[in-house]
Image: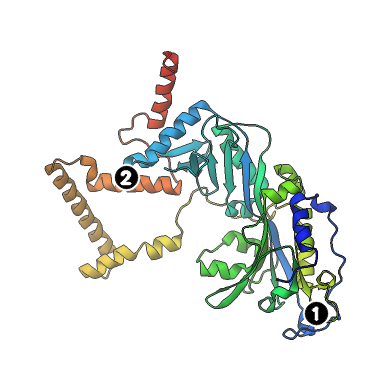
Amino acid sequence: MQHDTNNQSNNSKEAAGTAPQDLPAPEVESCQGTESSNTVPSTSINQSTTQILRTGIDSLYLSFRGEMYDDTAIRLSELKSLAQSDKDSNSALAQFMAGDQLLAVLGNGRPPYTFVLVDGWFRIEVAKANAKLLPMAYCKIASSLLTAMGHHFALDALNRVINAIGKPEGHPNVSRIDICADFTTDYPLDQLTEHEFVTKARSFSRHTVARQFSGFSFSAGSPTSARLYNKTQEMKSKNRPRPDLELQWSQNGWDGEQDVWRLEFQLRRETLAAFELVPYEKAIAALPDLWKYATRNWLRHTCPSTTDTTQSRWLTSPFWEAIQSTEWDEGTAAPLSRIYPDKGRSPSDYFLFINGLSTLTSFAAREGYINAGDAAKAYLEDAQEFHDKRAQQSIARDRKKSADVDFADYFRQKVESKRRFYNTAKNQPLDDGLHPADEAVAREYRKRSDGDY
């Protein structure tokens, strides 16, 4: 990639850093009246229209210093052991309740963190008690929550969970923040070339999906990176509808048909630290300045000049000017109607009623049924007979009864296992006795009171 002449020194300055608001933006004009390129007529460039539909935080990773409560450490250790069990009746109990937030505890940590808790809003990695040098918790906030409710709401909800785990010290720090702007444009983005970008990025990639242009990535994996991509195309190709996004786009003028593009910058801790913006409150307050820095100093699309070989003097393209001038609302959600995101991780209607019917239709085809009701009734009857027979055979072979259970227990265990996975309901022990995690806490405190600790 052709860079501006000070690219290498600029990269080192970025690492050392001054606050984004102190960095001078390039003095550039628009492309009005410039020469047309070989592929894009000047009339197409100068008469293009770009409309900003929303700005926001797409990803937010926070770390919390503090100390985990003793009973939480005992409870999480027991819940992690339950999650590792090969018995559904045990693993289904690996759930941590924090106020009204129900999170599944995973059977494996992610070094250096010992415990991992997840639901539809958060992924929380927790260090073992008294771990040195590590934050108490490292957390990722779901994009759907940030989009629908904004970062202030998300942090309040996360704080309630963190306060149930331990006692945090001070405010959280930002480990990574992804800021973005969604827009429509009739500017010919598929004809943009690497040569037209003035950037500090050290790598540049062009992407296609099903042989259709999908966007660019810049300096992927670096402390600062960027993506310019077709968001509606991504949603369709991955079959991941986003009604929360589409609602906000529509409220800001989207016609429901035109492709929506996204420019997204990923800023990791190294970049934020260079600007002294690691504390959460400072990073949030600096969002407008971070956006100016990213779109003016770190990455800029230009209209190349045939008479001036100095890239930094090339004029900014009209669609990029619109992006540069975006007004930030500090990442808060739109004040209009919101789609409240599910706290759980429940499957979509598409998954349940398209993929989910596959087994029933296969059974109907095998057994000769056409009517769905008749097929469903026969399926349940045959399933009950199958599992009950397996349970009886297990007992006759003197195997552990839990290896094969009757239909009622099998169904209950599978439902409870999915309750845990989807974060939809708190499961109780089969004998309705004391939960193993509560029992572990009580047992540990008895040891301590008896002087065995």
Report whether 285 appears left or right of 340: right
Q: Where is residue 6 in the image (x, y as percent from the top left)?
A: 80, 63
Task: Describe residue 233's horizontal placement relative to residue 412 as left or right.
Answer: right
Vertical order, 70 against 182 (above or below): above
| First along the sequence among labels 2 and 1 | 1
Query: How many angstroms separate mark 2 from mark 1 (CA)?
Result: 63 Å
* Amino acid type for the residue under numbered disc 1: Asn
Q: Residue 46 carries which label?
A: 1
x then y, percent, for residue 305: 82, 79
Q: Is residue 47 visible?
A: no
**Does residue 368 sit above or below 69 in this rendering?**
below
Quarter of the image for residue 320 reads bottom right
Which x, y percent locates residue 145? 59, 51
Q: Which mark is residue 162?
A: none
What residue would you read off at disc 2? 413
Crowding near the residue tagged with mark 1, few <14, some 14–19, many ≥20 C-alpha atoms within 10 Å: some
Residue in the image at 80% along x and 50% along y: 19
Task: Say above or below: 445 vs 410.
Answer: above
| Quarter containing the C terminus | top left
Q: Which colour scheme is used?
A: rainbow
Residue 177 visible somewhere in the drawing: yes
- Image quadrant in which the N terminus is located: bottom right
Q: Residue at x 83, y 55 (%)?
A: 23
Foreground residue among 341 and 390: 390
* Foreground pick, 135 / 86: 135
Judged from the image, the secondary structure of the residue bearing numbered disc 1 is: helix
x, y percentage for residue 197? Answer: 74, 71
The image shows a total of numbered marks equal to 2
